Image (tube, grey):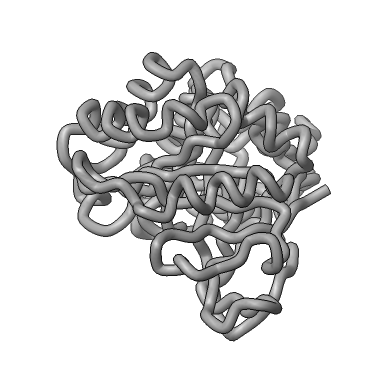
Amino acid sequence: MALNGIDISHYQSGIDLTRVHSDFVIQKATQGTNYVDPTCDKHYQIAKGAGILRGVYHFANGLDANAEADFFLKNVKGYVGDAILILDWEASAVNKGASWVEAFCKRVISEAGVKPWIYGSLSPLQAHGIPALAAKLDCGLWVAKYGSNPVQGYSKPAAPIPCTCLQFTSMGSLPNWSGRLDLNVFYGDAVAWKAYASTGMATVPSPSVNNPYAGYKLGALLKTDKDKKGNIIVGSTGQAVVMLQNALKWRGYDIGSSGADGKYGKDTANAVGRLQTFAGIKSDKIVGEDTCKALGWIWLGK
């Protein structure tokens, strides 16, 4: 099950949400520590009256994370429990890195009792380790990835990495609105949406969801098997390592500048260690039976 929806702000001030179809609407609420979007409550109340699922976002300016979170919560307190709360992390705020995102989200969690989504473009999200951070905090991840970005309507494309929601175009074209819209797909149903809104509960996609690297059988394609047990360890090479590196990259882990080179070195091992930590298994950087399960692979052993 998946839902389609739009995200809007004052730039879409004339939109009639009762005539432009969407399963959900995500509205800009605040920015920095002193800006409130003037269309926020109007759009919100119209969407609510029309029975459309709702989310509200804060556009980060990269100032003090706690101050921005407090300003956001002060202005959306009437929506908490009814709408999904979201951090929009882009532009200059990206320079503040993952620690800023973590501080903002922890403040929202502690003050509002809900877990916000984290929004951003795929490349900076991966570069700063935000997918892993979202998993650590149990927050939803909303990824922007457009591709060639032609004019288009709703669809339900596969996610480029495991995520809760995908913004797949900024060139959306829908009946009863003459301008272009951001279009999104939420990988869940209305019940899941309301769960995020009411509790912030994240449901991290299983390794097999839209995953081209799931189901791989480890053991047959190792060029070197240094531990003689069918595991991947530092020094292993070959196609199995390439598959591992691509699987890690797909899940949002940084594998270093060499990319999927088929050599299990320090960068790939560190990525495996982070995966193991977030999967709750021993962080030994050895890809064996437990790590295969975390990847959605089948471990053959020897």
Image quadrant where one finds the C terminus = top right
* Residue 20 position (above or below residue 5): below
Residue 254 visible: yes
What residue lies at 75% left-to-right and 43% top-to-bottom? 188
The single residue placed furthest to the right in the displayed view is 1
What residue lies at 33% left-to-right and 22% top-to-bottom? 107
Quadrant hosting residue 259:
bottom left
Residue 223 visible: no
Would you say 205 lies left or right of 284 here? right
Residue 109 percent location from the top left of the image: 43, 20
Would you say 54 lies left or right of 41 here? right
Residue 18 percent location from the top left of the image: 69, 61
Report the front residue among 91 and 263: 91
Would you say 256 lies left or right of 54 here? left
Quadrant hosting residue 65:
top left
The single residue placed furthest to the left in the displayed view is 63
What residue lies at 74% left-to-right and 68% top-to-bottom? 155
Report the front residue among 30 and 167: 30
Residue 71 percent location from the top left of the image: 27, 32
Residue 129 percent location from the top left of the image: 39, 42
Quadrant hosting residue 130:
top left
* Residue 117 position (above or below residue 273): below
